[in-house]
Each structure stands twice: as structure tokens, then as C-alpha cells.
Image: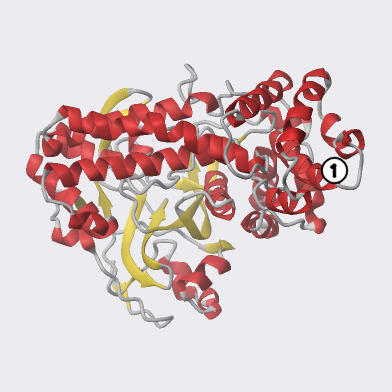
Amino acid sequence: MPSVESTLLPLNWRHPYDALGTAFYTPVQPAPLTNAHWVAQNHMLAQSMGWPSSVWSSDELLSALTGNEVLQGSQPYATVYSGHQFGVWAGQLGDGRALSLGVLDTLIGPQELQLKGAGKTPYSRMGDGRAVLRSSIREFLCSEAMHGLGIPTTRALCLTGSPDRVLREEVETAAVVTRVAPSFMRFGHLQHFAANGDTASLQLLADHAITQYFPELLSLEGGPKRYTALLARVTRLTAELLARWQAVGFCHGVMNTDNMSLLGLTIDYGPFQFLDGFDPAHICNHSDHQGRYAYARQPQVAYWNLFCLGQAMLPLIEDQDMAIAALETFKTDYPLLVDLAFAAKLGLTGSRADDHTLIDALLQLLAQEKTDLTIFWRRLSHATGQLAVKSLEKAFEPVRDLFINSAPWDKWLPAYVLRLQAQDLAQTSAQMLKTNPKFVLRNHLGEQVIQQAKIGDFSGVQDLLQVLQSPFDEHPAFETWAGFPPDWASSISISCSS
């Protein structure tokens, strides 16, 4: 495929993998789609990168970000990695339907652009290398929803579509998401070379990760100490990410080691879900027959995945005790981080020894009735501010109404109010409203705009994007999106093909 000189803006592509060699990647040309069209554009992300709004009117950009042309200087490639899937070693995997275009320097730092759904690669195995409109809309929206919530994530620059047919459980139409991140490196990239006994390549890749993404570690003594510090850093980032997931009720659905980011980003949006009712045992992925990736199990799965990463890095660390010590920090960091996250949702300032007991008791009573998580926290945020001008009973009445059996709530509430006694309640409420979102990407909201998009109406995708990018704002025009899910929402099936 010939390259096309960009007339849009200066795009000075860099390709850091070139210095590593083709053992780490394979150059791949994207496969064109017919009659490409815009589905959605992320103007906020483009602006933050320093791109002018005029780029979206360009047929050239539409063609390039669908995979129909290659912009000059870009050298599309797919990377190789391996990993565990559902706890079982799956061997070699790789970018089966993702093509990286290269790295660009932007106003928000160096960013790698990647097309998901642009055709087969050498790592597609039995797949077709394509993505469908349905799942691409979900990834596009959730990437930005997570960013709006302040949760580390890969981003989505735009979404294009085509009438070309793609077979999943049924015949669907094709789409391509342009994903953006400082890096798409996964645990599986390191696992691949460790599994093959290629310590030289493993070291080269680890050094690349340190130089590019963790340059502060270069001040440490090279060798085992530096690699141990890298493992500890990834462990900390993963603990921080999981605490944020759990606090907002996010279920990833397929936490395989190849779906874990070395940079602590949420990556690979497949069968994800934000909880409606709070059910710790909830399994959002209908392909997860054993419930391995249920909401409550996500932290322990993250540790298991980190342990696999530690095993992969052992040839570099050389000392098992050092590796285990780095990994064990997850067991101390995560409980503290998740308690801090829930304390913030409760508006608690400072830290007290009995805060964990207060938080745990609340989560237990929410689980007893599967209380709607997002609505509960939002109502609690408002109620706390009303406590200064209303009686305890009146202030918290909207929250109490969420419980069929309100006795456990009535028993828990006084301890919470006592904990808030010394705080400025108006200020506390305002901070809680910036912590507890009014809007999350519930499954039924995604499904509604997907059904619109299937008949060629993409306005819902763009509207929902706007709301999810500022989920703590009121957005009165979209009040219904903050309401309880309809009964049919529970019947939405999300699987690994989603």
C-alpha cells in the first residue's frame, strides 16, 4: 500500500520498536474497507493532542484511520506477545487485529496510535482481524468514560465504519477504532520472550520499557536491582488501577495476562460492565463459565497476573526473594488504596483506624439488596450536604428509599454521621459530587446507541460521549441516562466476542 503525504498537520512519526528488531514486531499493511464513514470523533482528545478541529473534515484522515491509506512516515506494525487466558498458558498470541501506526509527539506527551479492526496480522490465528460496529462503539465510549472518571486507560480518538460484513454470532458491519496511549505494552510482551528462553530479548524489551516509560529507574544501579524496581513499579500501578476499578464498580471481564498493561492502564475493552446493582459475585462475561473474573475476584486475579509477570522477569531479577518482595507490596498497598478510594466516596477526611469497618459494613448492606451502586453514591453525596439544613431522617430519606429492608441502613447511618461531625458538610458534599459520578456507561445505554448506529444514526454515540467525558456534571438534558436501568438491561449478553 503506497504512503500518502499528510496535508493535515505535521505528523512526525517515530517507531521505537525499530531499534529492537523484528523479533518483537512484524510490519503489516492494513486491509482496506469499502465506503468508509465517520461514526464518532473525539474532539476533546484531538484538541488536547494539539490537533486543529479542521482535521475532521478531511477525507484523507478518514481514509488513513480506517486503514485505507498509510500516512507518510507511518510504518504500521503488529507486536508479538504471549500470555495466560483464563488461567491457562495460551502460548504465542500477539496483535491479532491491532496495528500500531507509530508514535507522535503531542501536547500530552508521546502517544502511540493504533488501529483496531484494520485486518489480519501474522498473529490473528483463526481470526479475521476485523472489529464490528457493536463492540467498537463500546470500546470507543468506555475508553473515554474511564478517562472522564479519572481512571488510567487507553484512549479512543475516533471510530469509523463500513458496510463490509463481518461474521460473529451473526453477520455485522465492520468498524475501526483509533486507540491512543503512551504505550500498549502488556505483561504478555515480557512473558513471550521468557517462555521462549530468550533472555537477551527479554532484557532488551525490559530496558526499552524502562528507558521509554520509567526513566526515573535509570538512576538505580543497572541489573537485578533496576529490574526489581520495574516489577515493584508495575505492581504499584496495578494496585492503584484495581482500587479505582473496584470503587466505581467496573468489571473488566477478561483479565488475562495479555490484557494487563505494563503502565497500569485499563486496556482491551471487551466484555466489560459497570455494575448496576452491587453484587460482588457478578460475572459480566458470559464466556467466563467459572466466574474467574467476577467483580470481587479482580484484585486477587491482578495479583496472580503480577506473579506471572514476576516469573517472566526472574531471569533478569535473578533472586526469587527479591521478586516476591516486590510482588508482596500489592498485598499491603491494595487494601490501603481501596479503603482510601471508598473513604473519598464517603467524603471522609483524614484517616481513622475504624474507617475500614465503616466501609466494609456499608458494602455488605449494599450487597444484601444489590442496591444500585451509582445512584446510591450520588444520592449519598447530595444527602450529606442537606444534613446541615434538614433533620437526619429528611436529609437521608432519598438514600433510605433505595433499600427494601432499611433496618441495616438505619443501623449503619449514625456511625457515618458521627464520623462526619467535625467536617464542613457543604464542602464535603461538593467534594463527594466530584468523586461519585452521576453517569457511567451502563450496558443498556451502550446498547441503545448501538441500535441507533446500526440504522445509521450516530448522534447518540456522540451525545453519550459528551456526557461520559464529564460524568460528574449534571447534564439536565440527559437526566434519563442517570436513572435506574430498565428491566431488559439484565438480559444483555456480553461475551469475549463483544
Task: Using a 10 Å C-alpha cutoff, classify the residue at mark 1 as few (fewer than 14 neighbours), some (14 to 19) or many (20 or more).
Answer: some
Colour mapping used in the image: secondary structure
Which residue is drawn at the image coordinates 58% and 20% (left, top)? 281
Which residue is drawn at the image coordinates 66% and 60% (left, top)? 466
76 or 235, nearer to the observer: 235
> Which quadrant is home to the N terminus?
bottom left
Which residue is drawn at the image coordinates 85% and 36% (left, top)? 396
Q: Position of residue 113 (x, y in %)?
A: 38, 61
> Is 279 situated above or below 96?
above
Horizontal arrangement in the rendering, residue 451 relative to residue 98 (left or right): right
- The kind of residue on which mark 1 rests is Leu
Secondary structure, mark 1, is loop
> Is 377 situated above or below 466?
above
Q: Where is residue 344 in the image (x, y as percent from the top left)?
A: 62, 43
Q: Is residue 339 visible?
A: yes
> Is 238 situated above or below 460?
above
Q: Where is residue 218 in the image (x, y as percent from the top left)?
A: 19, 57
> Would you name the residue on which mark 1 appears?
387
122 or 233, nearer to the observer: 233
Horizontal arrangement in the rendering, residue 174 relative to residue 369 (left or right): left
Horizontal arrangement in the rendering, residue 408 relative to residue 498 (left or right): right
